[in-house]
Amino acid sequence: MKIAGFIKTTLLDWDGKVACTVYLAGCNLRCPYCHNAPIVTDADAVEGIDETVVLDYVRENSDFIDGVVVSGGEPSMDQDIHGFLKKIKALGVMVKMDTNGLFPDTLDDLIGSKLVDMVAMDVKSSLNERYRNAAGGDVDIEKIKRSIRVIIDSGVDHEFRTTAVPIFVKNEDIEDICRNIRGAKRYRIHQFRNKRTMDDSLSVLDPYPVSRLEEMANIARMYVKDVVIRGV
């Protein structure tokens, strides 16, 4: 496991919690709008941070840190993720994991083992052939659907989220996504940022106006009660 980044204190990565965030290197997707391209495309070149740095910090500051957010990259593709999360949980704090949902067996195991208290899963576009464009390559949609069911059926705290990239996400995509996550606790629509993207050509793509995001949120609320727009 290679820790590519560590933010010691954040109020943004876990709503209502004081957390620190760990970024793991490596991902099986190549989303054109990804903001963490260096740790995705060239994980071997990343100078890793020893896990003891994270664990020692959490141990020393567990009086005010509510939890640790484990992000990436894609944490659930790492074979050492179980052991790392066990070490974090042993310190008496909560764990939130960000995931792309393409490792449903690992996700099911982590939830069942009570190693995660909160899961945030990205759903990038309609669960059909359009998904591959937003994900930067072929995706097994059935794995995405299975992860959705694992999360919702488990009862673990969770949210699903979509970055509203204009060329990949339209109103009809939001409706398809939300039909598939019906029964979810929360859904978040993230404003697209055209800075520091994996695909440089997206730098000329203007984000949606807030009014369009509000349209999308209203569509989402037909299927999920708790819908919020982030990043505007």
Image: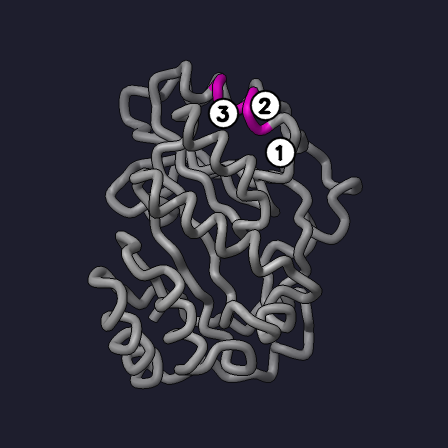
Predominant secondary structure in magenta? helix
Could you tell me which residue is drawn at 38 percent across and 47 percent down? Answer: 13
Between tags 3 and 1, which lies in front?
3
Q: Is residue 156 left or right of residue 110?
A: left
Q: Which mark is residue 3?
A: 1
Q: Report the Cα–Cα distance between label 3 and label 1.
A: 13 Å
Where residue 128 sits: x, y (%)?
56, 71
Above or below — where is 228 with respect to 110? below
| Range drawn in magenta | 81-87
- For residue 196, say whether it is visible: no
What kind of residue is marked 3?
Leu
The disc label shown at residue 85, or none:
3
Q: Is residue 116 above or below residue 31?
A: above
Residue closest to the far left: 225
Residue assigned mark 2: 51
Residues tagged 1 and 2 counted as in contact (Cβ below 8 A):
yes
